[in-house]
Amino acid sequence: MGIVRMGPPEGLVNALRLELGAGTFVETGTHHTPRGGRPDGSATS
């Protein structure tokens, strides 16, 4: 089995931290809209 890592890529977070001078990164989740649908799951047509 492979290694599963939840959350954003560590390298990307560190690059943003250095670029923005941030001391803390808080992940608030990822928004996902189903293909061909609206965020509430209803059809678009």
Image (tube, rainbow, N blue to C red):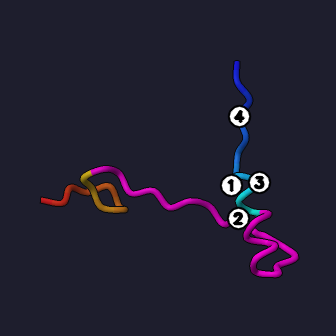
Work out which quarter of the rendered image holds the C terminus and state it: bottom left
Q: Name, please, the residue furthest toward the right.
A: 23
For the residues labelled 3 and 1, say whether their Cβ atoms are less than 8 Å apart.
yes
Q: Looking at the picture, does residue 12 appear above or below residue 20?
A: above
Q: Earlier in the sequence, mark 3 or mark 4?
A: 4
For the residues labelled 2 and 4, say whether their Cβ atoms are less than 8 Å apart.
no
- For mark 2, give the secondary structure: loop
For residue 22, side relative to residue 7 (left or right): right
Q: CA distance from mark 2 to mark 3?
A: 12 Å
In x, y percent, where is residue 6?
Answer: 70, 45
Query: Are there few (<14), some (14-19), or many (20+) residues within 10 Å of tag 3?
Result: few
Residue depicted at 62% across the width and 61% down the height = 29
For the residues labelled 1 and 2, say whether their Cβ atoms are less than 8 Å apart.
yes
Query: Are there few (<14), some (14-19), or many (20+) residues within 10 Å of tag 4?
Result: few
Q: Which residue has dot 1 on it?
A: 8
In x, y percent, where is residue 40?
Answer: 35, 61
Residue depicted at 24% across the width and 52% down the height = 36
Q: CA distance from mark 1 to mark 2?
A: 8 Å
For residue 44, side relative to residue 40 (left or right): left
Q: Which residue has dot 2 on it?
A: 27
Give residue 4's mark: 4
